[in-house]
Amino acid sequence: MPPLRTFILKVVNRCNINCDYCYVFNGPDQSWRGLPVRMSVEVAHAVARRIAEHATAHDLDHLDVVLHGGEPLLAGPRHLGAILQILHDRVPSVRFELQTNGTLLNDDWLDLFDRFDVRVGVSIDGRPVANDRHRVSHRGRSTSYAAVRGIELLRNRPHLFAGVLAVVDLHNDPADVHDYLASLGPAVIDFNLPHATHDAPPERTDPAEPEYGRWLSRVYDAWTGADSYTHSVRVLEDIVALSLGAKGSVESLGLAPADIVVVESDGSIENVDTLKAAAPGAAELGLNVFDHTFDEVADHPAIQQRRAGVAALAQECQRCPLVSVCGGGYLPHRLSAEHGYRNPSVYCQDLAHLIRHVQATLPA
């Protein structure tokens, strides 16, 4: 049984901004309402003990802990520092990452992250006109300038700046979004497709057209067409790697066994939390860090489904020549009430268009 290597800790279950596409607060699963606002030190001790136990059992030379939310900086520097200290002391092989909207970053936070070598990713969808279409305050005001101010602080400590993450919006110009994000100086740019299912499909102008695939293909052309760019665009780099027989780095592509689990603020252990976008309760496992080991988590049928490779996919996916690259698409995007997760991705045509576009540029 392959070990788990990435542990996403929901250290805060509230957010200081209101993104309309947020799968946690504006999605079908509203379980956050019954969870503690922030993870307690008691839960952090239990998490650290279980991760250390798992690392020892599987002789792991490193593993990743991602501090997530909500907005993790709402925990406050003292409380988050205590959680980092607990994990650092108990799990010597840990590497820390944190995903934030960037609006609360300041030098005090960066001093803390320097102390524990926490790499920071910032979510931003492009220049203000693009970003503020979805990512606004609870009063509907712009969040762009505060996010960019946080990014500028990170640029002064490039060893902490993990990169930026944007959600694809067909209303935004893809090359302009890419070029603007590149101008912020990240080492990595990530693009996520909006979470959608067959029963709640993504917004399109023409459902028969691969509009998201074309959008990302234009990002690929912008990225590869300029000699001056040195950053990675992770989803596109993964398509290149998987097309050439190498290993990818994201769970949403390829057939490698998933190694990510989520620990909620109350200590409950969940499947990949983006399943909250698919249906209420879709991420629940009925396990927690007080009573269960991460070996038990890895053995859970819902986790095994994410690790079953091609056998877990719909028949048409198993027969598709692109399956080793697309992996059937991201699990939440396969859901339908009729067939569960045994469907091609709701973005199937988009992934096929994008993969073929990328592959057409590669050496034979």
Image: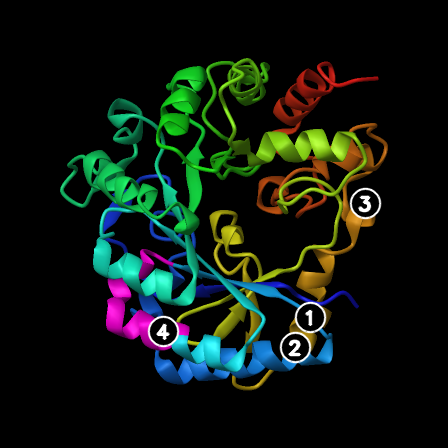
Tag 3 residue: 310
| Location of residue 316 with respect to 219 vertically, above or below | below
> Which label is found at residue 39?
4
Examine the residues drawn in magenta and state their main secondary structure. helix
In the picture, measured across the screen, residue 277 lies left or right of residue 59, that is left
Q: Amino acid at mark 2?
A: His
Residue 138: say if magenta.
no
For the question of whether residue 325 can be seen, the reply is yes
Q: Amino acid at mark 4?
A: Met
> Which label is found at residue 106?
none
Front tag of 1 and 4 = 1
Tag 1 residue: 60
Image quarter (top left, top right, bottom left or bottom right) of the N terminus: bottom right
Question: Is there CB contact under 8 Å for labels 4 and 3?
Answer: no
> Which label is found at residue 54?
2
Front tag of 3 and 2 = 2
Q: Amino acid at mark 3?
A: Val
Instruction: State which region is magenta.
Output: 69-84
Image quarter (top left, top right, bottom left or bottom right) of the C terminus: top right
Going from N to C along the chain, the mark reached first, 2 or 4, is: 4
| Location of residue 210 with respect to 2 vertically, above or below | above
Residue at the image point whose x is 13% and y is 42% from the top: 139
